[in-house]
Image (cartoon, rainbow, N blue to C red):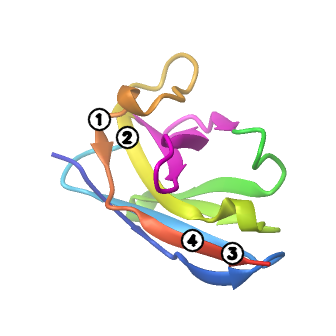
Amino acid sequence: QVQLVESGGGLVQAGDSLRLSCTASGGPVSTYTVGWFRQTPGQEREFVAGNTWTGGRTAYADAVKSRFTISRDNAKNIVYLQMDELKPEDTATYYCALRRGLIGPIPIMPNEYEHWGQGAQVTVSS
């Protein structure tokens, strides 16, 4: 069973950058699609960005396009979410998730993903 651990969150000021890491262990991941989601208390979990572990296809929510970028270190089984030009509205708990498969559109609904990390808190002050 694949396990995911997010890290790299923290408290920053508006305009600063953070890089979140999602480290996978416990099984092969090269045939999975990776999704990044975020959630604030009382709200639905929101799709942020997605990437096929193999193949390099990506998708971004409109709110983060041109500011957030997914990258990978395949040798270490790590997917990164580089977050630049952070805004207070980016404040949330960020989760990485995996689903089987690399074909078709990258899913944006949380219930389409099978494995989830514990979340990493990102707080952006104005």
| Mark 2, residue position | 98
> Would residue 101 be found to the left or right of residue 44 on screen?
left
Residue 100 visible here? no
Asked if the residues shown at circle 4 and circle 3 are in contact, with their CB atoms under 8 angstroms apart, the answer is yes
Mark 1 and mark 3 lie on one chain; the one further toward the N terminus is 1
38 falls in the magenta region: yes
Between tags 2 and 3, which lies in front? 3
| Amino acid type, residue under disc 3 in the picture | Val
* Cα–Cα gap, marks 1 and 3: 29 Å
Asked if the residues shown at circle 2 and circle 1 are in contact, with their CB atoms under 8 angstroms apart, the answer is yes
Residue 60's tag is none
Residue 112, percent across and down? 39, 26
Residue at 63 percent across and 53 percent down: it is 70
Q: Nearer the viewer, residue 4 or 56?
A: 4
Mark 2 and mark 3 lie on one chain; the one further toward the N terminus is 2
Between tags 4 and 1, which lies in front? 4
The residue range painted magenta reads: 31-60
Mark 4 and mark 1 lie on one chain; the one further toward the N terminus is 1
* Magenta highlight: main SS: strand
* Cα–Cα gap, marks 4 and 3: 7 Å
| Mark 1, residue position | 114
Residue 46, percent across and down? 55, 41
Q: Secondary structure at mark 2?
A: strand
| Amino acid type, residue under disc 1 in the picture | Glu
Between tags 1 and 3, which lies in front? 3
| Mark 3, residue position | 124
Q: Nearer the viewer, residue 119 or 66?
A: 119
| Amino acid type, residue under disc 4 in the picture | Val
